[in-house]
Structure formats: C-alpha cells, structure tokens
Image: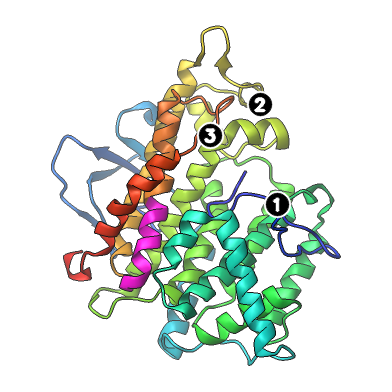
C-alpha cells in the first residue's frame, strides 16, 4: 500500500534506504460514534476547539448500527501519541518562533554540497509527486526546499517496508534508520539528503517526535498485517501519515491574519493525513490482500457487514456478473463516508496557513478526495480495478484549489 505522500521505489544501504533512483501527499474528532444527517442545515456542533460542519449527535456503540444511513464510528482511543506529538510541536513553535529550528548547526558539509542535496530532493519530489511539486513552486525558496527535504525523508522511510527490499528489512534496520534520524537532528547527517533535512530543522521549529512516530508506523507494518478495530487503524494512520502534517505545518506557517488557535490548525493537518491514508487503504485493498497478505480495513467493520477475512483475500468481485458483492458495496460506502468526514475536518485549518502554502495543500486535499469518487465510479471494485484520477481531472482541480487558497483566514 502506498502512503498518502508516496508511490514506490528506493534503494538500500546497510539496512537503510539510499536515494531513490531517478531511473526507476488528521485527526482529533468527536469521541465515539456520530450520526450525520445531510438533509438538515449545518449547525456546526463544537467538540473542544473543533467544529464539525454537519449535524451530529453522539449515539451508543453497536455493530448493527454501522449499516444505518449516516452512522459513522470514529476513533475513541489510541490518540495518546498523536496528542503528545501535537502538543510538543505547538510548544516548540511557541518557544522558538517561526524562523528558528531545534537542530544544531550542520557539520562537515559545504554550502555547495548542501545545495546539491536540496536540488536532489527537488528532483525526487518532482519525479514522484508531480502535482504536489508544482504546488511548491508558489512558495519562497526556503520553504520550498524544506518541504522537499521532508518529503524525501518520508519517502525513504516508507521504502524500508514497502520498497523492493522490504522482505529483507528487519526491526534492527529501522533502529539504525532512527539512529540516523537522531544524528541528522544533532547536526551530523549521513548523506546529502540527510544534510538537507538537518538544514531544514535548523531553520524551522520542527520537533523530532513525529519522525520517530513515523518510524514506529513502519515497525507496525513489519509485524501487524491486520487491524481489529478502527481505533487500531486510526493510530496506524497517524503514525504513517498524520505525522507528515506535524512535520510540514511549521514550514508552511500560519497566516498573520489568522486569529484562531494553533491547535485547530495542527488538528486539521492531522485530519488530512488520516483522510489521505484511509483513501490509500481503500484504493489498495485488492493489491494489499493479494501481494502482501495485508488487510488494513478493520476486522470489526468487516464483521459488521458479514464479510470474512478469507473473502477479502480471495476478492469479492464476480467476473461473470462484472460486479462486487452487495455486502462489499455497502461496506465500501461506509468506509468512504468516514474518509470524507476526515477530509471535511481537514478543510477547517487549510485556510489558516500562510497564503503561499495554501494552494499545494488544497490541491492535495482535492485530488486525494477525487480518488474516493473514482472508487465509486468503479462500482466499489477495488479488487481488480485500481482507482485513479485522470490527468484532465487533476488539471480541472487547479483553479478550484487556487480559488480556495485565495480566501482570507478571516473568512473561515
């Protein structure tokens, strides 16, 4: 399964990833279960500092309720790591300010080599994330390069467990990769790509914890091919995708006109990571089951729709009828609804970002949400058909993202 910001391929050196070869994109939510009614006007139900832009009421937990229209089961536990990392990130931003990072000065790398590292990060980002890379072109060079450095570190981390050498990766390899991370934050980068990361975290108030949490997410992939409940899956989504929001928000910055809380901005970034990762999981159900023996969708959710694990592994698509099983269709409708809920949560904070950072974030949000539309257009067949967004749809989303990015934070 691809991550929300990734797609494939890297090398390996001594158990850690090398630069990808050029030859070869979260979530504090109402607790418990929520019923959403789209036939009534939005009332804005407030949960802490988060406003849910729909009419919602908390209802009791019951497996049978999953098949009721408008019912969503959200995470109730497993948010401890997310809360801690968010609080650390906000505290660091308040302590250092927007233009100062926690890293020690870079050691052993000349400016020419550092420039080459950033250039290489830009090339990798452009090659694997073309639309996102295009969005970064509107950013000032310092922000632009920092985003590339973060993207490349995340990509290299992901390649450890999802790349061509994944079958040979051990927990010890991830331990070594974490040691390299710590060294980079201490001003002792291993290579030119790490040097770009070291320089980035010396310029922006980026905390190391989200990076460590992402590595922990990769550790989960080594030993956990199944998830019992959505609470478990939610924690995984934070670790492998929500963390990206905590890494990049200090770079993107907050608009001076925004007068809300930093917590709201960071929560929205976490929600976007969760939404993107849930979308990846739904898109890649068939591929993950067939090639990796992984089932990310919660077993409890499957049971609520009377679907067995074996049915997912063998596929619930009938070549003779050309359709998926009705149970799977109902199950997917529910899962898509939940992913869209998190996208809606993410929207509440994008407008608070600095103006030069809004467009790439809006673009990523809109494009990833369109993957859900594509799954629906495929009649929920994610066993033999992979959902994707055609180029013309990607291009058509650009003016929409630009329009949304131009709105003032005061309009939020």
Residue 27 at x, y percent in the picture: 42, 57
| Placement of 2 over or under 319, stated as above or below | below
For marks 2 and 1, the one nearer the N-term is 1
Q: Which residue is painted at 52% across and 64% down in the image?
A: 244
Q: Is residue 192 magenta?
A: no
Look at 27% across and 39% down and name the residue there.
36
For mark 1, give the secondary structure.
Answer: loop
The disc label shown at residue 375, or none:
none
Q: Is residue 71 left or right of residue 374?
A: left
> Is 147 on the left-hand or right-hand side of 353?
right
Residue that label 1 marks: 9
Kindly identify which residue carries mark 3: 300
Q: Distance between the residues labelled 2 and 1?
A: 25 Å
Q: Which of 75 and 280 is in front in this view?
A: 280
Question: Residue at the top extreme?
Answer: 320
Segment colored magenta: 354-365
Q: Element at badge 3?
A: helix
Which numbered marker is on residue 313?
Answer: 2
Percent of width and height locating residue 52 = 26, 53
Instruction: Answer few, some or many: residues within 10 Å of disc 1's Cα (few below 14, many 20 plus, some between 14 and 19).
Output: many
Of the residues under marks 3 and 2, which one precedes in the sequence?
3
Label 3 or label 1, whichever lies nearer to me, is: 1
Residue at horizontal 28%, vertical 52%? 400
- Label 3, label 2: how far apart the Cα atoms are: 16 Å
Q: Look at the magenta stretch and give its main secondary structure.
A: helix
In reply to whether residue 361 is colored magenta, the answer given is yes
């Amino acid at each position: 399964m691809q991550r929300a910001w990734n797609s494939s391929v890297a090398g390996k050196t001594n158990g850690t990833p090398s630069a990808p070869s050029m030859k070869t994109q979260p979530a504090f939510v109402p607790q418990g279960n929520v019923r959403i009614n789209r036939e009534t006007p939005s009332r804005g139900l407030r949960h802490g500092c988060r406003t849910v832009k729909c009419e919602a009421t908390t209802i009791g937990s019951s497996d049978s309720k999953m098949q009721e229209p408008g019912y969503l089961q959200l995470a109730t536990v497993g948010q401890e790591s997310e809360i801690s990392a968010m609080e650390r990130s906000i505290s660091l931003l308040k302590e250092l300010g927007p233009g100062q990072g926690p890293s020690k000065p870079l050691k052993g790398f000349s400016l020419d080599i550092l420039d080459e590292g950033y250039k290489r990060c830009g090339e990798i980002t452009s090659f694997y994330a073309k639309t996102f890379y295009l969005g970064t072109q509107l950013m000032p060079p310092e922000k632009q390069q920092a985003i590339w450095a973060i993207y490349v570190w995340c990509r290299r981390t992901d390649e450890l467990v999802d790349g061509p050498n994944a079958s040979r990766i051990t927990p010890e390899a991830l331990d070594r990769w974490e040691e390299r991370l710590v060294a980079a934050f201490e001003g002792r980068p291993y290579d030119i790509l790490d040097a770009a990361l070291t320089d980035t975290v010396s310029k922006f108030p980026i905390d190391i914890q989200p990076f460590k949490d992402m590595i922990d997410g990769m550790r989960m992939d080594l030993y956990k091919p199944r998830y019992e409940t959505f609470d478990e899956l939610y924690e995984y989504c934070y670790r492998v995708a929500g963390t990206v929001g905590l890494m990049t928000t200090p770079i993107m910055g907050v608009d001076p006109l925004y007068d809300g809380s930093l917590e709201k901005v960071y929560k929205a970034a976490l929600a976007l990571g969760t939404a993107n990762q849930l979308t990846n999981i739904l898109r890649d159900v068939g591929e993950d089951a067939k090639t990796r023996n992984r089932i990310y969708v919660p077993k409890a959710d499957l049971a609520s729709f009377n679907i067995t694990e074996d049915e997912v592994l063998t596929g619930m698509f009938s070549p003779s009828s050309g359709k998926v099983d009705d149970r799977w269709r109902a199950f997917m409708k529910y899962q898509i609804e939940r992913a869209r809920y998190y996208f809606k949560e993410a929207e509440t904070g994008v407008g608070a970002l600095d103006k030069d950072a809004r467009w790439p974030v809006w673009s990523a949000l809109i494009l990833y949400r369109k993957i859900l539309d594509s799954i629906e257009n495929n009649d929920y067949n994610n066993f033999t058909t992979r959902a994707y967004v055609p180029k013309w749809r990607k291009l058509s989303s650009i003016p929409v993202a630009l329009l949304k990015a131009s709105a003032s934070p005061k309009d939020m």
